[in-house]
Image (cartoon, coloured by chain):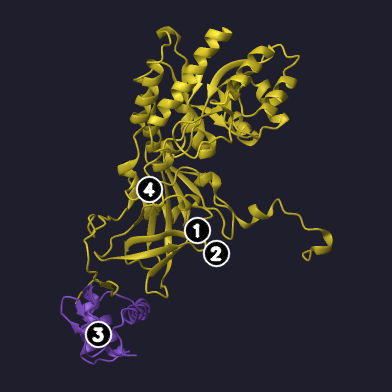
Amino acid sequence: MEKLPYEKPYIKKLQAGALNKFGSRTGLQPFKSIDGVSVKSLIENYGSPVFVLSEKQIRKNYRAAYRAFSTRYPKVQFAWSYKTNYLNAVCQIFHQEGSWAEVVSGFEYRKALGNGVPGNKIIFNGPGKSINDLQLAIEHDSLIHIDHFDELNLLLTLSKNLVNKPRVAIRINMDTGVYPLWDRFGFNYENGEAWSAVTKITGSGSLQLVGLHCHIGTYMLSADAYGIAANKLAELAVRCQTELNHKIEYLDLGGGFPSTNTLKGAYLPGNDTVPTIDDFAEVITSALLNFGFANDDLPLLILESGRVLIDDAGYLLGTVIANKRLANGKGAAIVDFGVNILFTSFWYEHQVSPAQDFAAHTENMVIYGPLCMNIDVIRESINLPLLNPGDQVVVHKVGAYNMTQWMQFITLRPAVVLIDEKLRTHLIRKNETLEYTAEPELVPAHLNNNK
Amino acid sequence: MKLKSNIATSENGFIFNPATGDSFSGNGMAAQLLEAMKSGKTEDDIKQDILSRYEVSESQLNSDWDNWMLQLKEANLLEI
């Protein structure tokens, strides 16, 4: 006789009181494949845990964002934010689509050069550029975005006897009605610091001021703030033209557009609350088009989006190691990936889906990573079906920041796989090995027992 | 590990504790286990019965049984 399907026994306390207006069903579905490639085969071939990126989704996101801006404004350029995900294969997808590179360190700058990005299509941002970094950027005719007066003074010294004047922009911080203000980067607009920097650069005769840049925040949930920022940058550009007879070639509105992840503590899911890329495009381009530039004299609009272009193209696949019940009766699952490789679990309530069929009952549980550290919590509270050790799970929308901010800590960092548009899988970063982590270490002779 | 004698259970998994007023709902397997426990079967008998009829390994059932006991204890449904 064929045996009956088994499910774990489970009871749930019934609560009296107001009903949850969202209902008790989670609408949870097993998530068995990514772009048609099965989760099971990905884990079989590349191990668990493993990051998976969808090239199809990355290109789709880029094209949607580019379309949103370019259908509203005639001169648009995207620059891929390297820090969001600087795996070379990922950068090359964006460069193939037409993105420049936006980098914030000498390391990232050299990575962009290594990816074949021409120097004049690299935007060099950030407060921490060294003399060597700046010299390299000057040699390659890159766009250097100045963060503070000390950097400006250094650039003036470096550019003293140069025939070709380095091309620079200044980063500007401002009040856009979003608090706290990000005033740690760049020159302040309201107190006149930005204008001082502008006049100092244009008056120096040794630097070309070609652009104005701002980056008003991150995970911005208000499109209107960008309208204010665009107006302030445009006002400064026009003032440069009228008072200094100096034309500003581009306005760089930075990034900060949110993905649809749900922020911790948010009442409603991200899908329902974040403005779309079209909302941002509409506000920014309207502000610029209505500002009063002559039609044939509009500045180039540069955008440095990262997160919104890649977050939903990334998945983390993993395996349940064990279940346990906490002292208060709450269920807990331990999975094989921790916060060391899923940094964004500190920011988001990531959606986690089982990768195989499951019984209808769900239980509220905690998901812990495998690290022997109290902070290693992937989700503090999530309704999931009863999972068994060995079951596979998929964490959604992990494409941004995780593959750059991850740490080799207690465990080794896993492989990253790209599914291309023809559904072929490619290993784009190998999993770390003990040898890889030991390679830079040196043991003094008197401590070396393995002579 | 005996269920409190005053606990009322229904065959579709509803559980009521008249002493506290608490009520619970359980899945199909929970309903079966409760019924078996109420009828006075031993732990071994209950497990043998489940193993013979359901697609489950002995080790999985043993670990789920331990977890089941923790749930009943937390719900205050077991004799102390």
> Few, some or many C-alpha atoms within 10 Å of disc 2 (few <14, some 14-19, many ≥20)?
few
Q: CA distance from mark 2 to mark 3?
A: 41 Å
Chain under label 1? A
Q: Is residue A241 visible?
A: yes
Question: Residue A133 location, x and y as percent?
Answer: 68, 30
| Chain with colour purple in the figure | B
Please tell me whether mark 4 sits on a helix, a strand or a loop: loop
Question: Residue A420 location, x and y as percent?
Answer: 41, 38
Question: Are the residues flagged by discs 4 and 2 from a single subunit?
Answer: yes
Q: Label 4 sits on what residue type?
A: Thr
Query: Which residue carries the number 4 mark?
Result: A262
> Few, some or many C-alpha atoms within 10 Å of disc 4 (few <14, some 14-19, many ≥20)?
many
CB under 8 Å between discs 2 and 1: yes
Q: Label 1 sits on what residue type?
A: Gly
Relative to A110, A366 lies left or right: left
> Few, some or many C-alpha atoms within 10 Å of disc 3 (few <14, some 14-19, many ≥20)?
few
Q: Label 3 sits on what residue type?
A: Asp
Residue drawn at (66%, 16%) of the image: A207
Chain under label 3? B
Q: CA distance from mark 1 to mark 4?
A: 19 Å
Give the quarter of the figure containing the C terminus of chain A. Answer: bottom right
Which label was assigned to residue A338? 1
Q: Quick check: B71 above or below A287?
A: below
Please tell me whether mark 1 sits on a helix, a strand or a loop: loop
Which label was assigned to residue B49? 3
Q: Label 2 sits on what residue type?
A: Met
Q: Quick check: A83 above or below A228?
A: below
Q: Which badge, 1 or 4, comes first in the chain's sequence? A: 4
